Amino acid sequence: MPVRTPCPIALSAAERVRLKKMTYGHKTEHRLRVRAQVVLHAARGRSNTPIDREAGLHLDTVRRWRGRFAQRDLPGLKDASAKHVFWIVDNGSSHRGKKATDRLTTAFSAVVFAGLTVLIALIGLSVVNVPMLTKMGVAAAGTVAIAVLIALTMIPALLGYAGRKVKPAGEKSKLLGGGRGAKKADRPNMGTRWASFVVRRPVAVLLLGVVGLGAAAIPANSLELGLGDDGSQPTSTTQRRAYDLLSEGFGPGFNGPLMIVVDAKDSDSPKGAVAKVTDEIKGLKHVTTVTPATYNKSRDTATITVIPDSKPSSTTTEDLVHSIRDTSAGIKADTGATALVIGTTAMNIDFSQKLNDALIPYLALVVGLAFLLLILVFRSILVPLKAALGFLLSVLAALGAVVAVFQWGWLSSLFNVEQTGPIMSMMPIFMVGVVFGLAMDYEVFLVTRMREAYVHGETPSQAVVTGFKHGARVVTAAAVIMIAVFSGFIGSSESMIKMVGFALAIAVFFDAFIVRMAIVPAVLALLGKRAWWLPTWLDRALPNMDVEGEGLKTLDEDALKDADPHEDRELVRA
Protein backbone atom coordinates (compact mmCIF):
# COMPACT_ATOMS: atom_id res chain seq x y z
CA MET A 1 0.00 0.00 0.00
CA PRO A 2 1.54 3.35 -1.00
CA VAL A 3 2.61 5.78 1.67
CA ARG A 4 0.55 9.03 1.75
CA THR A 5 3.34 11.59 2.13
CA PRO A 6 2.98 15.32 1.68
CA CYS A 7 3.79 16.45 -1.82
CA PRO A 8 3.83 19.85 -3.55
CA ILE A 9 1.42 19.98 -6.49
CA ALA A 10 1.80 22.73 -9.10
CA LEU A 11 -1.33 24.55 -10.33
CA SER A 12 -1.81 27.35 -12.85
CA ALA A 13 -3.54 30.60 -11.96
CA ALA A 14 -6.73 29.58 -13.78
CA GLU A 15 -6.83 26.29 -11.87
CA ARG A 16 -6.35 28.04 -8.54
CA VAL A 17 -9.28 30.39 -9.25
CA ARG A 18 -11.43 27.47 -10.23
CA LEU A 19 -10.54 25.58 -7.05
CA LYS A 20 -11.41 28.56 -4.87
CA LYS A 21 -14.83 28.83 -6.49
CA MET A 22 -15.48 25.11 -6.13
CA THR A 23 -14.46 24.83 -2.48
CA TYR A 24 -15.44 28.18 -1.05
CA GLY A 25 -17.53 27.89 2.10
CA HIS A 26 -16.86 24.19 2.84
CA LYS A 27 -15.81 23.31 6.39
CA THR A 28 -13.19 20.98 4.97
CA GLU A 29 -12.09 23.55 2.43
CA HIS A 30 -8.37 22.90 2.80
CA ARG A 31 -8.60 19.09 2.49
CA LEU A 32 -11.03 19.37 -0.42
CA ARG A 33 -8.76 21.78 -2.22
CA VAL A 34 -5.76 19.49 -1.89
CA ARG A 35 -7.74 16.51 -3.12
CA ALA A 36 -9.27 18.55 -5.92
CA GLN A 37 -5.80 19.49 -7.11
CA VAL A 38 -5.17 15.84 -7.84
CA VAL A 39 -8.58 15.63 -9.50
CA LEU A 40 -7.66 18.47 -11.84
CA HIS A 41 -4.49 16.66 -12.79
CA ALA A 42 -6.64 13.63 -13.58
CA ALA A 43 -8.99 15.76 -15.67
CA ARG A 44 -5.99 17.03 -17.66
CA GLY A 45 -4.87 13.50 -18.44
CA ARG A 46 -2.14 13.18 -15.78
CA SER A 47 -4.06 11.10 -13.27
CA ASN A 48 -1.43 8.41 -12.78
CA THR A 49 1.67 10.57 -13.05
CA PRO A 50 4.64 10.35 -10.64
CA ILE A 51 3.17 13.30 -8.75
CA ASP A 52 0.02 11.34 -8.05
CA ARG A 53 1.94 8.24 -7.03
CA GLU A 54 4.20 10.28 -4.75
CA ALA A 55 1.06 11.70 -3.13
CA GLY A 56 -0.10 8.17 -2.47
CA LEU A 57 -3.15 8.43 -4.71
CA HIS A 58 -3.54 5.92 -7.51
CA LEU A 59 -5.96 6.37 -10.37
CA ASP A 60 -8.85 4.59 -8.60
CA THR A 61 -8.40 6.79 -5.56
CA VAL A 62 -8.38 9.90 -7.75
CA ARG A 63 -11.62 8.85 -9.39
CA ARG A 64 -13.22 8.12 -6.04
CA TRP A 65 -12.34 11.53 -4.63
CA ARG A 66 -13.38 13.22 -7.87
CA GLY A 67 -16.84 11.66 -7.56
CA ARG A 68 -17.16 12.67 -3.90
CA PHE A 69 -16.09 16.22 -4.62
CA ALA A 70 -18.48 16.55 -7.57
CA GLN A 71 -21.38 15.69 -5.30
CA ARG A 72 -20.70 18.83 -3.28
CA ASP A 73 -21.53 21.19 -6.17
CA LEU A 74 -24.65 23.33 -6.01
CA PRO A 75 -27.90 21.61 -6.99
CA GLY A 76 -29.17 21.96 -10.56
CA LEU A 77 -32.38 23.77 -11.41
CA LYS A 78 -35.07 23.65 -14.12
CA ASP A 79 -38.17 25.72 -15.29
CA ALA A 80 -40.72 28.70 -14.62
CA SER A 81 -44.32 29.85 -13.80
CA ALA A 82 -46.23 26.93 -12.22
CA LYS A 83 -44.87 24.43 -14.74
CA HIS A 84 -41.53 26.26 -14.99
CA VAL A 85 -41.00 26.09 -11.23
CA PHE A 86 -41.91 22.38 -11.25
CA TRP A 87 -39.30 21.91 -13.95
CA ILE A 88 -36.61 23.68 -11.91
CA VAL A 89 -37.31 22.06 -8.54
CA ASP A 90 -37.70 18.59 -10.06
CA ASN A 91 -34.27 18.70 -11.66
CA GLY A 92 -32.62 20.61 -8.86
CA SER A 93 -33.56 18.05 -6.25
CA SER A 94 -32.87 15.02 -8.44
CA HIS A 95 -29.27 15.72 -9.50
CA ARG A 96 -25.99 16.83 -8.01
CA GLY A 97 -22.61 17.86 -9.26
CA LYS A 98 -21.74 17.95 -12.95
CA LYS A 99 -25.02 16.29 -13.85
CA ALA A 100 -26.85 19.05 -12.02
CA THR A 101 -24.94 21.65 -14.02
CA ASP A 102 -26.00 19.97 -17.26
CA ARG A 103 -29.61 19.92 -16.10
CA LEU A 104 -29.32 23.60 -15.20
CA THR A 105 -28.18 24.50 -18.71
CA THR A 106 -30.92 22.51 -20.42
CA ALA A 107 -33.62 23.70 -18.03
CA PHE A 108 -32.88 27.39 -18.40
CA SER A 109 -32.73 27.09 -22.17
CA ALA A 110 -36.07 25.27 -22.15
CA VAL A 111 -37.62 28.00 -19.99
CA VAL A 112 -36.44 30.77 -22.31
CA PHE A 113 -37.63 29.11 -25.51
CA ALA A 114 -40.92 27.95 -24.01
CA GLY A 115 -41.53 31.49 -22.84
CA LEU A 116 -40.77 32.83 -26.31
CA THR A 117 -43.38 30.57 -27.90
CA VAL A 118 -45.99 31.78 -25.43
CA LEU A 119 -45.07 35.42 -26.11
CA ILE A 120 -45.42 34.82 -29.86
CA ALA A 121 -48.93 33.38 -29.39
CA LEU A 122 -50.13 36.16 -27.07
CA ILE A 123 -48.61 39.16 -28.82
CA GLY A 124 -49.78 37.67 -32.12
CA LEU A 125 -53.36 38.41 -31.05
CA SER A 126 -52.70 41.97 -32.17
CA VAL A 127 -52.91 40.86 -35.82
CA VAL A 128 -56.65 40.32 -35.31
CA ASN A 129 -56.92 44.12 -34.99
CA VAL A 130 -59.49 43.96 -32.21
CA PRO A 131 -58.43 46.34 -29.40
CA MET A 132 -59.85 44.16 -26.64
CA LEU A 133 -57.92 41.08 -27.79
CA THR A 134 -54.78 43.13 -28.33
CA LYS A 135 -54.89 44.48 -24.77
CA MET A 136 -55.56 41.02 -23.35
CA GLY A 137 -52.68 39.52 -25.34
CA VAL A 138 -50.15 42.20 -24.40
CA ALA A 139 -51.11 42.07 -20.72
CA ALA A 140 -50.84 38.28 -20.65
CA ALA A 141 -47.52 38.42 -22.50
CA GLY A 142 -46.16 40.79 -19.87
CA THR A 143 -47.22 38.36 -17.15
CA VAL A 144 -45.45 35.48 -18.92
CA ALA A 145 -42.28 37.54 -19.35
CA ILE A 146 -42.25 38.29 -15.61
CA ALA A 147 -42.80 34.59 -14.83
CA VAL A 148 -39.82 33.62 -16.99
CA LEU A 149 -37.61 36.22 -15.31
CA ILE A 150 -38.66 34.92 -11.90
CA ALA A 151 -37.87 31.37 -12.96
CA LEU A 152 -34.41 32.38 -14.13
CA THR A 153 -33.53 34.55 -11.13
CA MET A 154 -35.64 34.33 -7.97
CA ILE A 155 -36.36 30.58 -8.06
CA PRO A 156 -32.64 29.65 -8.34
CA ALA A 157 -31.86 32.12 -5.57
CA LEU A 158 -34.51 30.64 -3.27
CA LEU A 159 -33.37 27.09 -3.98
CA GLY A 160 -29.76 28.12 -3.44
CA TYR A 161 -30.78 29.61 -0.09
CA ALA A 162 -32.56 26.37 0.83
CA GLY A 163 -29.47 24.42 -0.17
CA ARG A 164 -29.62 20.68 0.28
CA LYS A 165 -32.91 20.91 2.18
CA VAL A 166 -34.56 20.52 -1.24
CA LYS A 167 -34.10 16.80 -1.78
CA PRO A 168 -35.62 14.03 -3.85
CA ALA A 169 -38.13 11.74 -2.12
CA GLY A 170 -35.58 9.07 -1.37
CA GLU A 171 -33.42 11.44 0.66
CA LYS A 172 -36.18 13.05 2.73
CA SER A 173 -36.98 12.16 6.29
CA LYS A 174 -39.73 9.65 6.92
CA LEU A 175 -41.88 12.44 8.39
CA LEU A 176 -41.85 14.20 4.99
CA GLY A 177 -42.44 11.08 2.98
CA GLY A 178 -38.83 10.01 2.67
CA GLY A 179 -37.72 6.50 1.96
CA ARG A 180 -40.26 5.91 -0.77
CA GLY A 181 -37.82 6.85 -3.50
CA ALA A 182 -35.12 4.71 -1.93
CA LYS A 183 -37.40 1.69 -1.66
CA LYS A 184 -38.41 2.06 -5.30
CA ALA A 185 -35.02 3.08 -6.65
CA ASP A 186 -34.87 0.14 -9.03
CA ARG A 187 -38.46 0.55 -10.18
CA PRO A 188 -39.01 2.82 -13.22
CA ASN A 189 -41.47 5.63 -12.74
CA MET A 190 -44.80 5.91 -14.54
CA GLY A 191 -43.37 8.10 -17.29
CA THR A 192 -40.67 5.55 -18.06
CA ARG A 193 -43.13 2.66 -18.15
CA TRP A 194 -45.54 4.54 -20.42
CA ALA A 195 -42.78 5.67 -22.80
CA SER A 196 -41.45 2.10 -22.99
CA PHE A 197 -44.93 0.88 -23.86
CA VAL A 198 -45.32 3.50 -26.61
CA VAL A 199 -41.88 2.73 -28.04
CA ARG A 200 -42.78 -0.96 -28.25
CA ARG A 201 -46.15 -0.29 -29.96
CA PRO A 202 -45.79 3.06 -31.76
CA VAL A 203 -48.13 2.27 -34.67
CA ALA A 204 -51.05 1.22 -32.47
CA VAL A 205 -50.66 4.23 -30.16
CA LEU A 206 -50.33 6.63 -33.09
CA LEU A 207 -53.40 5.30 -34.90
CA LEU A 208 -55.49 5.29 -31.73
CA GLY A 209 -54.54 8.87 -30.88
CA VAL A 210 -55.01 10.29 -34.39
CA VAL A 211 -58.29 8.44 -35.04
CA GLY A 212 -59.66 9.44 -31.64
CA LEU A 213 -58.87 13.12 -32.09
CA GLY A 214 -60.08 12.99 -35.68
CA ALA A 215 -63.42 11.59 -34.56
CA ALA A 216 -63.72 14.30 -31.91
CA ALA A 217 -62.99 16.96 -34.56
CA ILE A 218 -65.82 15.91 -36.91
CA PRO A 219 -68.45 18.23 -35.32
CA ALA A 220 -66.15 21.19 -36.00
CA ASN A 221 -67.37 21.08 -39.62
CA SER A 222 -70.71 22.46 -38.38
CA LEU A 223 -69.15 25.30 -36.39
CA GLU A 224 -71.35 28.42 -36.29
CA LEU A 225 -69.91 31.60 -34.82
CA GLY A 226 -71.84 34.43 -33.25
CA LEU A 227 -72.16 36.59 -30.16
CA GLY A 228 -74.55 35.55 -27.44
CA ASP A 229 -77.70 37.50 -26.62
CA ASP A 230 -80.11 37.43 -23.71
CA GLY A 231 -81.57 34.21 -25.08
CA SER A 232 -78.46 32.37 -23.90
CA GLN A 233 -78.85 33.57 -20.31
CA PRO A 234 -80.15 31.18 -17.61
CA THR A 235 -83.95 31.04 -17.37
CA SER A 236 -83.78 32.34 -13.81
CA THR A 237 -82.48 35.76 -14.89
CA THR A 238 -84.73 38.75 -15.64
CA GLN A 239 -82.98 39.27 -18.98
CA ARG A 240 -83.94 35.82 -20.15
CA ARG A 241 -87.54 36.15 -18.95
CA ALA A 242 -87.94 39.46 -20.78
CA TYR A 243 -86.38 37.94 -23.91
CA ASP A 244 -88.81 35.03 -23.83
CA LEU A 245 -91.83 37.32 -23.31
CA LEU A 246 -90.90 39.47 -26.31
CA SER A 247 -90.32 36.41 -28.47
CA GLU A 248 -93.70 34.93 -27.53
CA GLY A 249 -95.59 38.21 -28.01
CA PHE A 250 -93.93 39.73 -31.07
CA GLY A 251 -91.75 36.99 -32.59
CA PRO A 252 -88.10 36.03 -32.05
CA GLY A 253 -86.81 38.75 -34.39
CA PHE A 254 -88.23 41.51 -32.19
CA ASN A 255 -85.26 41.00 -29.83
CA GLY A 256 -82.81 41.90 -32.61
CA PRO A 257 -84.27 44.44 -35.06
CA LEU A 258 -82.16 45.66 -37.99
CA MET A 259 -81.91 49.36 -38.71
CA ILE A 260 -81.39 50.46 -42.31
CA VAL A 261 -79.98 53.93 -42.98
CA VAL A 262 -80.67 55.21 -46.50
CA ASP A 263 -78.37 58.01 -47.66
CA ALA A 264 -80.18 59.63 -50.62
CA LYS A 265 -78.18 62.86 -50.84
CA ASP A 266 -76.85 61.92 -54.28
CA SER A 267 -80.23 60.74 -55.54
CA ASP A 268 -82.42 62.81 -57.85
CA SER A 269 -85.49 61.67 -55.90
CA PRO A 270 -84.64 60.88 -52.26
CA LYS A 271 -88.19 59.88 -51.43
CA GLY A 272 -88.38 57.54 -54.42
CA ALA A 273 -85.03 55.99 -53.49
CA VAL A 274 -86.20 55.33 -49.92
CA ALA A 275 -89.43 53.77 -51.22
CA LYS A 276 -87.45 51.49 -53.54
CA VAL A 277 -85.26 50.35 -50.64
CA THR A 278 -88.36 49.59 -48.57
CA ASP A 279 -89.96 47.58 -51.36
CA GLU A 280 -86.77 45.60 -52.03
CA ILE A 281 -86.38 44.66 -48.35
CA LYS A 282 -90.04 43.63 -48.06
CA GLY A 283 -89.48 41.18 -50.90
CA LEU A 284 -86.61 39.38 -49.12
CA LYS A 285 -87.09 36.10 -47.29
CA HIS A 286 -87.25 35.91 -43.48
CA VAL A 287 -88.57 39.47 -43.11
CA THR A 288 -91.58 39.87 -40.80
CA THR A 289 -92.07 43.63 -40.66
CA VAL A 290 -90.63 46.74 -42.32
CA THR A 291 -91.58 49.98 -40.57
CA PRO A 292 -92.27 53.21 -42.47
CA ALA A 293 -89.27 55.38 -43.14
CA THR A 294 -88.35 58.18 -40.76
CA TYR A 295 -86.69 61.20 -42.46
CA ASN A 296 -84.31 63.80 -41.17
CA LYS A 297 -85.08 67.53 -41.40
CA SER A 298 -83.53 67.91 -44.84
CA ARG A 299 -85.50 64.88 -46.09
CA ASP A 300 -82.41 63.36 -47.79
CA THR A 301 -81.65 60.65 -45.21
CA ALA A 302 -84.07 58.09 -43.74
CA THR A 303 -84.06 55.17 -41.32
CA ILE A 304 -86.04 51.96 -41.72
CA THR A 305 -86.50 49.27 -39.06
CA VAL A 306 -86.62 45.63 -40.20
CA ILE A 307 -87.91 42.84 -37.96
CA PRO A 308 -86.58 39.38 -38.99
CA ASP A 309 -88.52 36.19 -38.37
CA SER A 310 -85.58 34.58 -36.57
CA LYS A 311 -83.68 35.28 -33.36
CA PRO A 312 -80.66 37.64 -33.46
CA SER A 313 -77.96 34.96 -33.06
CA SER A 314 -79.31 32.61 -35.75
CA THR A 315 -77.65 32.02 -39.10
CA THR A 316 -80.95 32.96 -40.78
CA THR A 317 -80.65 36.52 -39.45
CA GLU A 318 -77.04 36.64 -40.59
CA ASP A 319 -78.08 35.58 -44.10
CA LEU A 320 -80.74 38.31 -44.12
CA VAL A 321 -78.15 40.97 -43.27
CA HIS A 322 -75.97 39.83 -46.16
CA SER A 323 -78.98 39.81 -48.50
CA ILE A 324 -79.87 43.42 -47.60
CA ARG A 325 -76.29 44.50 -48.25
CA ASP A 326 -76.26 42.71 -51.59
CA THR A 327 -79.50 44.46 -52.54
CA SER A 328 -77.99 47.81 -51.59
CA ALA A 329 -75.43 47.53 -54.38
CA GLY A 330 -78.15 47.30 -57.06
CA ILE A 331 -80.18 50.13 -55.51
CA LYS A 332 -77.20 52.45 -55.57
CA ALA A 333 -76.66 51.75 -59.25
CA ASP A 334 -80.31 52.53 -60.03
CA THR A 335 -81.05 55.50 -57.75
CA GLY A 336 -77.71 56.74 -56.42
CA ALA A 337 -78.83 56.10 -52.83
CA THR A 338 -76.80 54.03 -50.37
CA ALA A 339 -78.43 51.65 -47.87
CA LEU A 340 -76.43 50.70 -44.77
CA VAL A 341 -77.33 48.09 -42.13
CA ILE A 342 -76.58 49.12 -38.54
CA GLY A 343 -77.67 48.08 -35.06
CA THR A 344 -76.47 45.63 -32.41
CA THR A 345 -77.38 42.56 -34.42
CA ALA A 346 -75.52 43.74 -37.54
CA MET A 347 -72.53 44.79 -35.43
CA ASN A 348 -72.33 41.37 -33.78
CA ILE A 349 -72.47 39.69 -37.19
CA ASP A 350 -69.67 41.91 -38.53
CA PHE A 351 -67.54 41.37 -35.44
CA SER A 352 -67.93 37.59 -35.70
CA GLN A 353 -67.04 37.70 -39.38
CA LYS A 354 -63.93 39.75 -38.67
CA LEU A 355 -62.72 37.27 -36.06
CA ASN A 356 -63.52 34.35 -38.34
CA ASP A 357 -61.51 35.89 -41.19
CA ALA A 358 -58.56 36.61 -38.88
CA LEU A 359 -58.31 33.07 -37.50
CA ILE A 360 -56.36 31.56 -40.42
CA PRO A 361 -53.81 34.43 -40.70
CA TYR A 362 -53.33 34.33 -36.94
CA LEU A 363 -52.75 30.59 -36.99
CA ALA A 364 -50.31 30.94 -39.87
CA LEU A 365 -48.37 33.67 -38.06
CA VAL A 366 -47.98 32.06 -34.64
CA VAL A 367 -47.46 28.52 -35.94
CA GLY A 368 -44.98 29.74 -38.56
CA LEU A 369 -42.91 31.76 -36.10
CA ALA A 370 -42.99 28.97 -33.53
CA PHE A 371 -41.98 26.48 -36.22
CA LEU A 372 -38.87 28.55 -37.00
CA LEU A 373 -38.07 28.92 -33.30
CA LEU A 374 -38.39 25.18 -32.69
CA ILE A 375 -36.07 24.49 -35.63
CA LEU A 376 -33.44 26.52 -33.78
CA VAL A 377 -34.11 24.66 -30.53
CA PHE A 378 -34.24 21.08 -31.81
CA ARG A 379 -32.03 21.36 -34.93
CA SER A 380 -34.64 19.39 -36.84
CA ILE A 381 -37.36 19.84 -39.46
CA LEU A 382 -39.66 16.94 -38.61
CA VAL A 383 -39.86 17.53 -34.85
CA PRO A 384 -41.22 21.12 -35.16
CA LEU A 385 -43.51 19.99 -37.99
CA LYS A 386 -44.89 17.23 -35.81
CA ALA A 387 -45.39 19.69 -32.94
CA ALA A 388 -47.35 22.11 -35.16
CA LEU A 389 -49.54 19.42 -36.73
CA GLY A 390 -50.26 17.89 -33.33
CA PHE A 391 -51.37 21.28 -32.02
CA LEU A 392 -53.73 21.80 -34.95
CA LEU A 393 -55.20 18.35 -34.40
CA SER A 394 -55.85 19.03 -30.70
CA VAL A 395 -57.45 22.42 -31.51
CA LEU A 396 -59.80 20.88 -34.09
CA ALA A 397 -60.75 18.14 -31.63
CA ALA A 398 -61.45 20.74 -28.92
CA LEU A 399 -63.60 22.79 -31.32
CA GLY A 400 -65.48 19.63 -32.22
CA ALA A 401 -66.17 18.92 -28.56
CA VAL A 402 -67.39 22.49 -28.02
CA VAL A 403 -69.75 22.26 -31.01
CA ALA A 404 -71.12 18.92 -29.80
CA VAL A 405 -71.90 20.22 -26.31
CA PHE A 406 -72.85 23.88 -26.77
CA GLN A 407 -74.24 23.88 -30.32
CA TRP A 408 -75.72 20.40 -30.71
CA GLY A 409 -76.59 19.87 -27.05
CA TRP A 410 -74.76 16.59 -26.43
CA LEU A 411 -74.24 16.03 -22.70
CA SER A 412 -75.84 19.44 -22.13
CA SER A 413 -77.47 18.26 -18.90
CA LEU A 414 -74.10 17.12 -17.57
CA PHE A 415 -72.58 20.57 -18.07
CA ASN A 416 -75.83 22.41 -17.24
CA VAL A 417 -76.13 24.02 -20.69
CA GLU A 418 -79.66 25.47 -20.72
CA GLN A 419 -79.65 26.96 -24.23
CA THR A 420 -77.69 25.79 -27.26
CA GLY A 421 -76.73 28.08 -30.10
CA PRO A 422 -73.80 29.51 -32.08
CA ILE A 423 -70.32 29.39 -30.57
CA MET A 424 -69.04 32.70 -29.23
CA SER A 425 -67.06 34.21 -32.09
CA MET A 426 -64.14 35.26 -29.89
CA MET A 427 -63.68 31.82 -28.33
CA PRO A 428 -61.78 29.97 -31.12
CA ILE A 429 -59.09 32.60 -31.60
CA PHE A 430 -58.75 33.12 -27.85
CA MET A 431 -58.45 29.36 -27.33
CA VAL A 432 -55.80 29.09 -30.02
CA GLY A 433 -53.70 31.82 -28.39
CA VAL A 434 -53.83 30.32 -24.90
CA VAL A 435 -53.54 26.63 -25.81
CA PHE A 436 -50.77 27.20 -28.35
CA GLY A 437 -48.51 28.65 -25.69
CA LEU A 438 -49.23 25.78 -23.31
CA ALA A 439 -48.80 23.16 -26.05
CA MET A 440 -45.40 24.50 -27.08
CA ASP A 441 -44.36 24.62 -23.42
CA TYR A 442 -45.16 20.93 -23.05
CA GLU A 443 -43.38 20.15 -26.31
CA VAL A 444 -40.22 21.97 -25.29
CA PHE A 445 -40.14 20.45 -21.80
CA LEU A 446 -40.46 16.90 -23.11
CA VAL A 447 -38.46 16.98 -26.32
CA THR A 448 -35.48 19.01 -25.06
CA ARG A 449 -34.69 16.15 -22.68
CA MET A 450 -35.05 13.68 -25.54
CA ARG A 451 -32.80 15.81 -27.73
CA GLU A 452 -30.22 16.11 -24.97
CA ALA A 453 -30.18 12.36 -24.39
CA TYR A 454 -29.87 11.70 -28.13
CA VAL A 455 -27.00 14.17 -28.52
CA HIS A 456 -25.22 12.52 -25.60
CA GLY A 457 -25.20 9.14 -27.33
CA GLU A 458 -28.46 7.37 -26.56
CA THR A 459 -30.44 5.65 -29.30
CA PRO A 460 -33.63 7.40 -30.48
CA SER A 461 -35.85 4.97 -28.55
CA GLN A 462 -33.75 5.29 -25.40
CA ALA A 463 -33.84 9.07 -25.74
CA VAL A 464 -37.66 9.03 -25.84
CA VAL A 465 -37.77 6.99 -22.63
CA THR A 466 -35.21 9.25 -20.95
CA GLY A 467 -37.18 12.34 -21.88
CA PHE A 468 -40.34 10.91 -20.35
CA LYS A 469 -38.49 9.71 -17.27
CA HIS A 470 -37.58 13.28 -16.31
CA GLY A 471 -40.24 15.39 -18.06
CA ALA A 472 -43.52 13.47 -17.97
CA ARG A 473 -44.37 14.24 -14.35
CA VAL A 474 -43.70 17.95 -14.84
CA VAL A 475 -45.95 18.14 -17.92
CA THR A 476 -48.60 16.02 -16.19
CA ALA A 477 -48.65 18.21 -13.09
CA ALA A 478 -48.76 21.42 -15.15
CA ALA A 479 -51.57 20.09 -17.38
CA VAL A 480 -53.64 18.87 -14.43
CA ILE A 481 -53.35 22.29 -12.78
CA MET A 482 -54.44 24.12 -15.94
CA ILE A 483 -57.34 21.72 -16.53
CA ALA A 484 -58.48 22.21 -12.93
CA VAL A 485 -58.30 26.00 -13.26
CA PHE A 486 -60.20 26.09 -16.55
CA SER A 487 -62.76 23.55 -15.35
CA GLY A 488 -63.65 25.88 -12.51
CA PHE A 489 -65.30 28.18 -15.04
CA ILE A 490 -67.63 25.43 -16.26
CA GLY A 491 -69.73 25.90 -13.14
CA SER A 492 -70.50 29.52 -14.04
CA SER A 493 -74.08 30.46 -14.83
CA GLU A 494 -72.88 32.61 -17.75
CA SER A 495 -72.94 30.49 -20.89
CA MET A 496 -70.03 32.36 -22.48
CA ILE A 497 -67.76 31.83 -19.46
CA LYS A 498 -68.85 28.21 -19.25
CA MET A 499 -68.04 27.70 -22.93
CA VAL A 500 -64.58 29.25 -22.69
CA GLY A 501 -63.70 27.21 -19.59
CA PHE A 502 -64.84 23.97 -21.21
CA ALA A 503 -62.98 24.72 -24.46
CA LEU A 504 -59.68 25.51 -22.72
CA ALA A 505 -59.90 22.53 -20.36
CA ILE A 506 -60.68 19.99 -23.09
CA ALA A 507 -58.04 21.49 -25.41
CA VAL A 508 -55.32 21.19 -22.75
CA PHE A 509 -56.42 17.62 -22.03
CA PHE A 510 -56.27 16.63 -25.70
CA ASP A 511 -52.92 18.32 -26.30
CA ALA A 512 -51.08 17.30 -23.12
CA PHE A 513 -52.26 13.72 -22.66
CA ILE A 514 -53.02 12.56 -26.20
CA VAL A 515 -50.77 14.62 -28.48
CA ARG A 516 -47.69 15.21 -26.29
CA MET A 517 -47.87 12.03 -24.20
CA ALA A 518 -48.94 9.56 -26.90
CA ILE A 519 -48.65 10.84 -30.47
CA VAL A 520 -45.31 12.63 -30.02
CA PRO A 521 -43.35 9.64 -28.60
CA ALA A 522 -44.99 7.31 -31.11
CA VAL A 523 -43.94 9.51 -34.04
CA LEU A 524 -40.39 9.90 -32.68
CA ALA A 525 -40.11 6.14 -32.17
CA LEU A 526 -41.21 5.51 -35.76
CA LEU A 527 -38.92 8.15 -37.25
CA GLY A 528 -35.85 7.09 -35.28
CA LYS A 529 -32.75 9.04 -36.27
CA ARG A 530 -34.64 10.68 -39.12
CA ALA A 531 -36.54 12.74 -36.56
CA TRP A 532 -33.37 14.74 -35.86
CA TRP A 533 -32.41 15.24 -39.49
CA LEU A 534 -31.55 18.75 -40.66
CA PRO A 535 -30.22 19.65 -44.13
CA THR A 536 -26.52 20.43 -44.04
CA TRP A 537 -26.92 23.84 -45.67
CA LEU A 538 -29.62 24.78 -43.17
CA ASP A 539 -27.55 23.49 -40.26
CA ARG A 540 -24.69 25.78 -41.29
CA ALA A 541 -27.01 28.76 -41.84
CA LEU A 542 -28.86 28.54 -38.53
CA PRO A 543 -27.23 29.88 -35.36
CA ASN A 544 -26.41 27.23 -32.77
CA MET A 545 -28.58 27.88 -29.71
CA ASP A 546 -26.83 25.04 -27.79
CA VAL A 547 -29.83 24.02 -25.69
CA GLU A 548 -27.97 20.93 -24.49
CA GLY A 549 -25.11 22.99 -23.04
CA GLU A 550 -22.43 21.31 -25.14
CA GLY A 551 -20.71 24.63 -25.68
CA LEU A 552 -20.12 25.08 -21.96
CA LYS A 553 -18.66 21.60 -21.68
CA THR A 554 -16.37 22.17 -24.66
CA LEU A 555 -15.30 25.56 -23.30
CA ASP A 556 -14.43 24.03 -19.94
CA GLU A 557 -12.42 21.23 -21.53
CA ASP A 558 -10.62 23.58 -23.89
CA ALA A 559 -9.69 25.86 -21.00
CA LEU A 560 -7.98 22.97 -19.23
CA LYS A 561 -6.25 21.77 -22.40
CA ASP A 562 -4.99 25.22 -23.35
CA ALA A 563 -3.69 26.06 -19.88
CA ASP A 564 0.09 26.57 -19.88
CA PRO A 565 1.55 23.92 -17.56
CA HIS A 566 4.45 26.24 -16.65
CA GLU A 567 2.45 29.45 -16.22
CA ASP A 568 2.25 31.05 -12.77
CA ARG A 569 2.68 27.84 -10.80
CA GLU A 570 2.02 27.71 -7.06
CA LEU A 571 3.31 25.00 -4.76
CA VAL A 572 0.70 23.69 -2.37
CA ARG A 573 1.79 21.47 0.50
CA ALA A 574 -0.43 18.35 0.70
Image: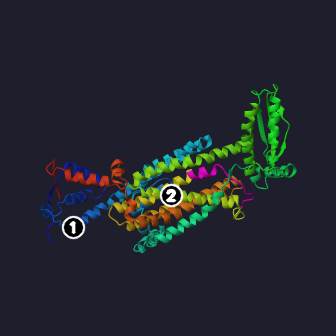
Residue 65 placed where, x, y %? 25, 64
- Residue 66 appears in which quarter of the rendering? bottom left
Q: Determine the secondary structure under disc 1.
A: helix
- Residue 345 appears in which quarter of the rendering? top right
Q: Mark 1 points at which residue?
A: 61
* Residue 352 or residue 98, whichever sits in front: 352
Instruction: Please say whether residue 95 is visible from this viewpoint.
Output: no
* Residue 346 or residue 418, whichever sits in front: 346
Q: Determine the secondary structure under disc 2.
A: helix
Q: Name the residue under label 2.
A: 389
Residue 468 placed where, x, y %? 44, 65
- Determine whether, in the image, residue 23 is placed left or right of residue 442: left
Instruction: Please say whether residue 397 is visible from this viewpoint.
Output: yes
- Determine whether, in the image, residue 395 is placed left or right of residue 565: right
Identify the mark nearer the N-term, 2 or 1: 1
* Image position of 19 with respect to 462: above or below: above
Quadrant assignment for the N terminus: bottom left
Q: Number of callouts in the render?
A: 2
Q: Which residue is drawn at 54% across and 60% down?
A: 511
Q: What residue type is labelled 2?
A: Leu
- Residue 235 appears in which quarter of the rendering? bottom right
Frontmost of labels 2 and 1 is 2
Instruction: Judge the density around disc 2: few (<14), some (14-19), many (≥20) Cα neighbours within 10 Å.
Output: few
Confirm whether the magenta stretch covers residue 166: no
Mark number, residue 284: none
* Residue 495 or residue 552, whichever sits in front: 495
